[in-house]
Amino acid sequence: MKVAIFFGSISDKSTMKNAADMLKKFDISYKSYVISAHRLPDILSNTIKKIESEGTDLIIAGAGLSAHLPGFISSKTILPVIGVPIHHCNNSYGSLGGIDALFSIVQMPKNVPVATVGINNSYNAALLAIHILSIKYKNIRKSLLKFRMETTDKLKTKIEQYL
């Protein structure tokens, strides 16, 4: 079982770290790649073929601005792709607060699906990946059920403090 995490720029690393941390929490192996869909399309295509041959189960791809990376990846594979629209507060390129990236990822044409999470929410991308993997892997399913119970218990405890 394996997850590939792609991001288009080294500046996306801090946002995508939450996905890596969440996968680590569930002992899910992953590998990260920094490859621009626009600047290195041939390298990206070859890398997708490579990870498919290695038995990768799914892909998390984060990108900002035009955010073509998740869609490009989806056009090259049948593996599930989860897109993370990225916005950098200090971005000097005149981005639209991440809405540009969100629309680019969520508005994929027919036959090129990308599951999409909220802006900068790589944590949820990893959690969605974990949910998908739990269908195939019983150990992940067991860990996910435990995680959900613990999360619910923590929330109940927090709410009870205010009653």
Image: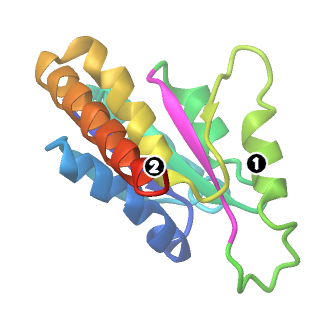
Which numbered marker is on residue 159?
2
At mark 2, the secondary structure is helix
In the picture, which quadrant includes the N terminus?
A: top left
Asked if the residue at tag 1 contacts the one at tag 2, i.e. Cβ–Cβ closer than 8 Å, the answer is no
Q: Position of residue 150 (x, y in %)?
A: 25, 40
Number of the front mark, 2 or 1: 2
**Residue 64, magenta (yes or no):** no
Decide: is 101 above or below 75.
below
Which amino acid, mark 2?
Ile
Decide: is 120 above or below 9.
above
Q: Position of residue 73 (x, y in %)?
A: 55, 37
Tell me the crowding category of disc 2: few under 14, some 14 to 19, or many 20 or more residues within 10 angstroms, Cα based.
few
Which numbered marker is on residue 129?
none
Which amino acid, mark 1?
Leu
Describe the colour scheme in one phrase.
Answer: rainbow
Q: Is residue 54 visible?
A: no
Horizontal side, residue 93 vs residue 34: left or right: right
Q: Which region shows up in magenta?
A: 79-87
Q: Residue at position x 67%, y 22% from top?
A: 112
Horizontal side, residue 11 vs residue 39: left or right: left
Q: Nearer the viewer, residue 26 or 68?
A: 26
Q: Nearer the viewer, residue 72 or 60?
A: 60
Q: Is residue 95 visible?
A: yes
User: How many angstroms separate mark 2 from mark 1 (CA)?
Assistant: 32 Å
Horizontal side, residue 151 vs residue 125: left or right: left
Disc 1: which residue? 102
**Residue 86, magenta (yes or no):** yes
